Amino acid sequence: MLRYKSSLSLIELILSMALLGAIILGAVSFDYASHYFLQSSERASLILNELNFILEHIHKNASRATGDFFNPGIISNGINLLLIRLDLNNPSTPFTYNDDIWVRYRINPIQANQFQFCANVNIDGSCNIPEEIISQRVVAPPIFRSPGGIVNAVNISNLTIRYDPGVSVEPRKNPEISIRSPITFTAYYSTN
């Protein structure tokens, strides 16, 4: 009489191990890919937020600029320096400019990837207080220009920020974002 043993053959064992290996390999590769895409989207999101912070910071001060045609409240050197005159007096003194303060945005002349803000600038251009570093990811400095015929306004263009400024662009590992078209900021209250 023949007896049938209910056990696994060597072929069935090899097939089940190969199937289990394929499932584990698929799970590990899916985990790696999801981590990679999460990291790249976080980096892109970080530089987008940093660019947004820079633009909002400039907009906040440019919108409060005070000046007129002969004493503009927003001055740029056409390259990478922006000066904004603020009247912080309460109540404001719109026609008296000698009590106003100037704020400055510029690229650090020593470390070219640092975008700096000074909240109180002397008449000679020096900063009274330590400058605040707004960003350390600037690759191409912004170009500040006065739009033609408009006083107390500034166009900002060509600002480029990269996740790691010292490394070349890789869309997933080292994303970059740029402003190519000019963005105009104007003073809300001008004495023109």
Image (tube, rainbow, N blue to C red):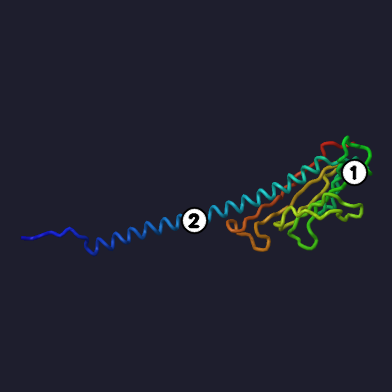
Query: Does label 1 or label 2 sit earlier along the sequence?
Result: 2
**Cβ–Cβ below 8 Å for labels 1 and 2?**
no
User: 151 or 20: which is nearer to us?
Assistant: 20
Residue 192 in sight in this render: no
Q: Amino acid at mark 1?
A: Asp
Percent of width and height locating residue 160: 70, 54
User: 184 or 32: which is nearer to us?
Assistant: 32
User: 154 or 109: which is nearer to us?
Assistant: 109
User: 62 or 128: which is nearer to us?
Assistant: 128
Residue pointed to by mark 2: 33
Q: Please give the label number shown on residue 100.
A: 1
Residue found farthest to the bottom? 10
Quadrant of the image containing the C terminus = top right
Residue 19 in sight in this render: yes
Q: Amino acid at mark 2?
A: Ala
SS state under label 1: loop
Residue 1 falls in image quadrant? bottom left
Q: Residue at x 69, y 54 (%)?
A: 161
Q: Residue at x 80, y 50 (%)?
A: 144
Crowd around label 2: few <14 · some 14–19 · many ≥20 (10 Å): few
